[in-house]
Amino acid sequence: MVTIEEAHKIIKAQKVKLKTETRELSDCLGFSISEDINARFDMPSFDNSAMDGYALCGISLEYTIVGEVAAGDKKEFELKEGEAVRIFTGAKVPENISAVMMQEKTNVDGSKLSLEQMPKEGLNIRKKGEELTQGQLVFKKGTTITPAGIGLIGSLGIQKVEVFRKPLINLITTGNELIAPGKPKAEGQIYESNSYALAAACEQFGFHCHDKKQIEDDFEAIKSGIKDSLETSDVLILSGGISVGDYDFVKQALEENGVEEQFYKVFQKPGKPLYFGRKEDKFVFALPGNPASSLSCFYVYVMPFLYQLSGSEKNGLQRYSFPISHAFENKGDRPSFLKAKINNGIVEILDGQGSSMILSMAHGNAMAFIDAETSLKKGEKVECLLIS
Ligand code: AMP
Ligand code: MG
């Protein structure tokens, strides 16, 4: 048995050579950049107008309009003091322009332009290189690409991006009692829901579960299922069969497949019978079958590890402290992740904390972390892990 901190430490310490791939710009949201990206040119790469209006040569209130320049135009103007050109947002500002006046503050009579106020030098001109200069570091290796990041990379003219490959994830659920949703349920059976919740949790963080299997509580079947799934995955997630019951075959089946235990059992509630193992560069999490336990173990341990394998600087759920809505006592001897709801900056510990109970988790939006044998008064701050 390890503590929560030890479990995290063991997970973080796993050394593995990250794989990289080249992806189309349009297809790299959520991936982590595998090499620094530097600006290939100044941005903007030429002085341009921030407004629709008039580009002015010299500072005064009266000008003569001598032409027009629109966004994308290549034409060059040589303006003399007192001359102006009609200009539009994004258009290249001619060489000796002092300022751009927005059209709302001008009056035009034929070629005569008069301004309602004196322009200031440099007004409404976006200067070459004011956002980025050539060679400047734009993204450090490991940065996760956001929509704005995609926009920025595109604006640098980059169409193919070097990123860390995301891990291939396979899922195995075990249990004789499990039947797929949509099928008629016989006495003693329950609907298999963990694979759906876990696959969705993968998607929630930008990961994809490639294959899922449901296997009976049969040692040989589990052993050969693990063998096949390991071959096609970087991370294998199992649910159920990892506790101490007579039909819990997962641990032994993993051992017989050459998976080496990194830790088994974490001193926490829920999710005590959590297993983490490794076979060469492949990793296995065997999660307890109780629906709330398996999902909270995913959030607390699996998800950060998926980020780790993806070369991401992210390391898990966001954590914030909020005042608690009512006095609460964690009477248990284990630190607990409690299903909770944050509302208007106050956290409520929800009813229905049993390991099997997914209702409170589905209605909540956080897990409140409360140490063993700890009493909290109303209004005391509690650390919360945000799950949505
Ligand atoms: P186990 O960890 O196999 O002992 O299972 C613990 C509890 O979780 C039992 O009540 C199981 O019926 C239930 N359970 C196990 N796997 C699943 C699953 N995939 N979906 C829903 N419930 C499950
Ligand atoms: Mg079972």
Image (cartoon, rainbow, N blue to C red):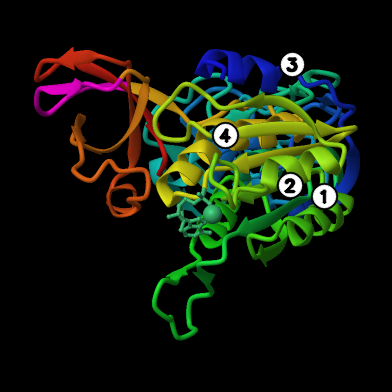
The kind of residue tagged 2 is Leu
The kind of residue tagged 1 is Ser
**Secondary element type, mark 3:** loop
Q: Which numbered mark, 2 or 3, is in the foreground of this view?
A: 2
- Characterize the local packing of mark 4: few (<14), some (14-19) or many (20 or more) Cα atoms within 10 angstroms: many
**Secondary element type, mark 4:** loop
> Disc 4 versus disc 3: distance between alpha carbons?
18 Å
In the depicted structure, whether residue 119 falls above or below residue 257 = above
Contact between labelled residues 2 and 1, with CB atoms less than 8 Å apart:
yes
Q: Which residue corresponds to mark 3?
A: 13
Contact between labelled residues 1 and 3, with CB atoms less than 8 Å apart:
no
The kind of residue tagged 3 is Ala
Residue sitting nearer the eye, 162 or 105: 162
Residue 324 magenta-highlighted:
yes
Label annotation for residue 353: none
Q: Is residue 164 visible?
A: no
Residue 72 magenta-highlighted:
no
> Disc 1 versus disc 2: distance between alpha carbons?
6 Å
Q: Give the image quarter of residue 115.
A: top left
- What span is in magenta? 321-332
Counting from the top left corner in percent of width and height, residue 213 is at: 69, 65
Residue depicted at 61% across the width and 31% down the height: 304
Q: Give the image quarter of residue 221.
A: bottom right
Q: Is residue 322 left or right of residue 151?
A: left
